[in-house]
Amino acid sequence: MAAGANIGEDIALFEAVHGSAPKYKGQNKVNPTALLLAAGLMLDYLGEQAAAEKLDKAIAEVIREGKAVTYDLKPGKTEGVVGTREMGEAIKSKL
């Protein structure tokens, strides 16, 4: 769930530290948190601090509630476990 920012003098790149997960393509099961946190870093870099803070709070709230999170955040449990899209939608609804 770690986001990364590579910032140079003329360019910046924001990404999930773990990189892509091509083996999970189309399976709707990976945790979107790292990529969304990277988007928050990008918003902050672009001077959109309020939007970045709002995104961070929405992500934290969804994870804290545990009602719509991916399987890796609830090992051994099925209640409240959803796919990538559903977790993203839950975060979106908090915005």
Image (cartoon, rainbow, N blue to C red):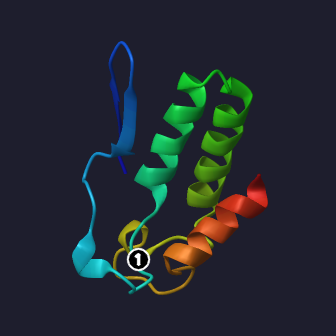
Q: Position of residue 8 (x, y in %)?
A: 32, 18
Above or below, 34 against 91 in this view is: above
Most extreme residue toward the front is 10
Residue at x 58% of width, y 70% of height: 87
Above or below, 29 against 21 in this view is: below
Above or below, 68 against 19 in this view is: below
Most extreme residue toward the top is 9
Q: Secondary structure at mark 1?
A: helix
Residue at x 59% of width, y 48% of height: 60
Question: In the figure, is residue 77 to the left or right of 39?
Answer: left
Which residue, given by chain and number where applicable, does mark 1 sit on?
71
Question: In the figure, is residue 27 to the left or right of 89?
Answer: left
Residue type at mark 1 is Tyr
Quadrant assignment, res 20: bottom left
Quadrant assignment, res 25: bottom left
| Of the pair 90 and 66, the residue shown nearer to us | 90
| Of the pair 16 and 81, the residue shown nearer to us | 16
Q: Position of residue 32 (x, y in %)?
A: 46, 62
Question: In the figure, is residue 51 to the left or right of 64?
Answer: right
Residue at x 26% of width, y 68% of height: 21
Q: Position of residue 69 (x, y in %)?
A: 53, 70
User: How many tags in the picture?
Assistant: 1
Q: Position of residue 33 (x, y in %)?
A: 47, 55
Q: Residues within 10 Å of mark 1 (few under 14, many from 20)?
A: some
Question: In the figure, is residue 95 to the left or right of 1?
Answer: right
Residue at x 67% of width, y 25% of height: 49
